[in-house]
Image (cartoon, coloured by chain):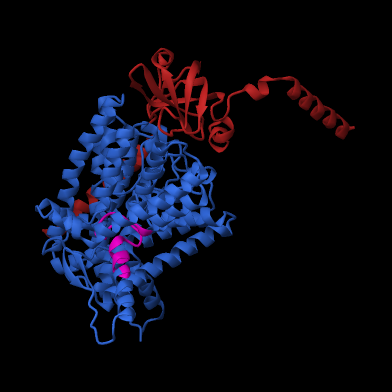
Chain colours: A red, B blue
Amino acid sequence: MRFFSIKWLLLLVCFTGLLCPSFAAGPLSSAELINRANEYDGRMVTYKGEAIAEVMRRGDFAWVNLHDGDNAIGIWAPLALINEIVYTGSYKARGDIIEVSGIFHRACPEHVGDLDIHASSLRKIESGRLIPEAIKPIRLKQALILLGVLLLIWISTLFSRK
Amino acid sequence: MILKPGKKDLKAIGYYLGKIIIGLSLTMVVPILAGLAVKEISPVLDFLISMQAGLLTGVILIKLCNTDCELNWMQGMIVVSLAWIAAMILGAIPMYLSGHWGSYLDACFDAMSGFTTTGLTLVQRLDHMSLTHNLWRHLTLFIGGQGIVIIALSFFIKGASGAFKLYVGEARDEKIMPNVINTSRFIWMVSIVYLIIGTLALSLIGIVGGMKPFSAIFHGACIFMAAFDTGGFSLQSQSIFYYRSFALEIATVIIMILGALNFRLHYHIWAGNRKEMAKNIETVTFFLSIIIVFSIVAIGLSQSGVYPKAVMLFRKGFFQLISSHTGTGFQTIYSMQFINEWNNLALVGIILAMGLGGAVCSTTGAIKMLRVGIIFKAFIEDIKRIILPEKVIVIQKFHHIKEVFLEDKQVRSALLITLAYLILYLIGAYVGMFYGYPFLKSLFESTSALANTGLSCGITSSSMPVMLKATYIMQMWAGRLEFMSVFTLIGFFVAALKGK
C-alpha cells in the first residue's frame, strides 16, 4: 500500500514537471553556465546571484559580478539597469540578490574572450543589508590571558637580569 | 656510523627557531594596524591572539635553548625547514579564527600556500572576507617570497656565518652583496621600491576601471604582492578575472615577469648594467622557453577552436602561460574551463611552463631556468664531444653575471634537483589518481603545488580528501625549499632514532 502511494506521488511530480515550462526557464547556476558554456553560448539566459565587491562603471555601462554560492559571473549592463543595486557583498555587507536576463557569451567578442552575460534586464530579488560586526567575548578573554602571560614573562626577565 | 644529535644541536636549533618565530609574529602588527584603521575589531582580536601565541612560543624557545654558539650547516638546514612549518602553524591561526576555512588543516594548507608563494586556496566565502585577513593572506606571500628566514636575517640574527647557512637553507645560494645580511636588506629594498611603483600603477588602472580610490589602492597593493612574489592569491574569488581589465592584465604580466627574475639580475640592472639582461643564461633561457611553450599552448588552443579570434587566444593563452611559467597562479578563466575547453596539448603546455619555473634567487618555484640552461649547455657539450675529433678539447661556458666554465659538478647538481622535481611531480599525480582523478588533471594540480604555482584545474577545494591536502602541503613545502633542507630534516630524525 505504501509502495503504491509513493509510485503515484512520483508520477504526479513528473507530470507536473512536464506541464510546467517555468522549470526550464528558471535561473541557471554558475556551474551549469561554466560547465556547459558551449551549449548556452549566444543564448538568452537567466542567472541569479549576490552582487559582490563593487560596481565598476565604464562609460555608459558597468561591470557587476554576481555570486551564486559556487562562482561569480561578470554581468555587463547599461548604467540605467544597475541603479537598483545598493548593497554589494563584502565583509561589512550582504549584497543585493539580483536576477539578470541577457545574452551569455562563452568567449565574448566585445570583451576579448571573457565569459560573461550582457544584461538586457535586471531585477532586485532581495535587498542586501549591512552586517553588524559580532565580537566574540571568548576571543577578548583569550587575548587578555595571553597578554597577561607575556607580561609576566617580561617582568620575570627584568628581575632575572637584576 | 650515524651520530645521534646532541643537546647542543637541539639548543642551537631551538634558539634560532625561537628568533624566527618572534620575527614572524611581529609581522602581524601590520594587519592589526590595518584592522584598527578600518574598524574591523573582530579580525584584530584574531591577530592579537595569534601574535601573542607566537611571541610566547618564541620567547619560551629562546629561554629554554639559550645559547651563543653559531649554527653549523646541518643545524641551519633544520632551522630553515622547521621555520617554514612553524610559519604555517602560526600563520594559519588567524585564518582559522576568521571562520573562512572549513578546518584548521584547510587554514594550514592556505598558510603554507601563502608562505611558499603557491596560491592554491581552500578558502570559503572569499568575497566576504575582512580587509584585515585579506591583507594577511597577501602579506604571507610577501614574507614568504622574500624568504621567512630573511626577515630574521635582516633584523634579528647578528652572526654572518650562521646567517649564511640559513640563507642557503632557504634555497637561495646566491649572494648579491658580499654579506648575506646586506643581501637580505637589498632584497627587501628592491621589493619595497617595486611595491610602491607597482601599487601606484595598478591603483591608477583600478580607478580608471571604475573602482573607488581606497579600494583601488588596496587591491593594487595586494595584486602587486601576489604578482611580484609570484604567489597568486587574490582578493576576489574570480582572481584577476574579477577586474575585467586588459590594462590590468598587461601590468600584472610585467610584474609577474619582474618577480620571476633573479634578484641578482635586478641588482645589476639597478646598478646600470642593463646588458646583463640580454646575456644572462637565465633570462635567455626564460624568454626562449616562453616562446616555445606559448607556441605549444597556442597550437593547442587553435586546434580546440576555443577562442575564435587570434587576439582572444593571445590574451587568454599568454596570460595563463606567464602566470604558470612565473609560478604565480593568477587566472583569467575559471578553473573548470581548463578541463572543459582547453585541449590536452594546451594543458600540457601549461604543465610544462609550471614545471620549468623562473629564475633562481627569485620568488618562483620549480626546476628553474639556470638549471634548464646548464642541462642544455651540457647536452650541447656532449654532442660536440661526439662530433669533433677526439684531440679537440671541448670547453663550454655560460654567462651568469660573469663568464662561468661549465663543470660536471654544476651539471650533476642541476640534474639531481631536476630529477627530484620530476619524481615528485609524478608522485603527486599518482596520489591524485589514487583518489580517482584523471592523470592529466592530477599531474596539473601536483605540478602546480610542487612548483609553487597555484593554478588549479578544479581538484583543489575544501572537499578534497585529507590525504591529498596533506600531499599538496608537503609538495609546496619541499618545492619551496628545493629539497635539501627537507632531506636534512628527515636525516636528522633518522639520526635521532638510529644514531649512536
Relative image position of residue B455 (x, y in whole percent): 42, 48
Left or right, B103 with respect to B327, comes to: right
Relative image position of residue B240 (x, y in whole percent): 37, 37
User: Is residue B96 in sight in this rendering?
Assistant: yes
Relative image position of residue B494 (x, y in whole percent): 40, 76
| Quadrant, the C terminus of chain B | bottom left
**Residue closer to the observer: B79 or B124:** B124
The relative height of residue A90 versus residue B263 in the rendered view (above or below) is above
Does the stretch in magenta take in A126? no
Q: How many marks?
A: 0
Residue at 25%, 26% in the rendered image:
B213
**Residue closer to the observer: B500 or B417:** B417
Left or right, A43 with respect to B114, comes to: right
**Residue closer to the observer: B33 or B10:** B33
Does the stretch in magenta take in B370? yes
Residue at 86%, 33% in the rendered image:
A2
User: Is residue B51 in sight in this rendering?
Assistant: no
The relative height of residue B381 versus residue B292 in the rendered view (above or below) is below
**Residue closer to the observer: B213 or B290:** B290
| Quadrant, the N terminus of chain B | bottom left
In the image, which residues are magenta? B356-376
Relative image position of residue A61 (x, y in whole percent): 38, 19
Residue at 43%, 19% in the rendered image:
A77
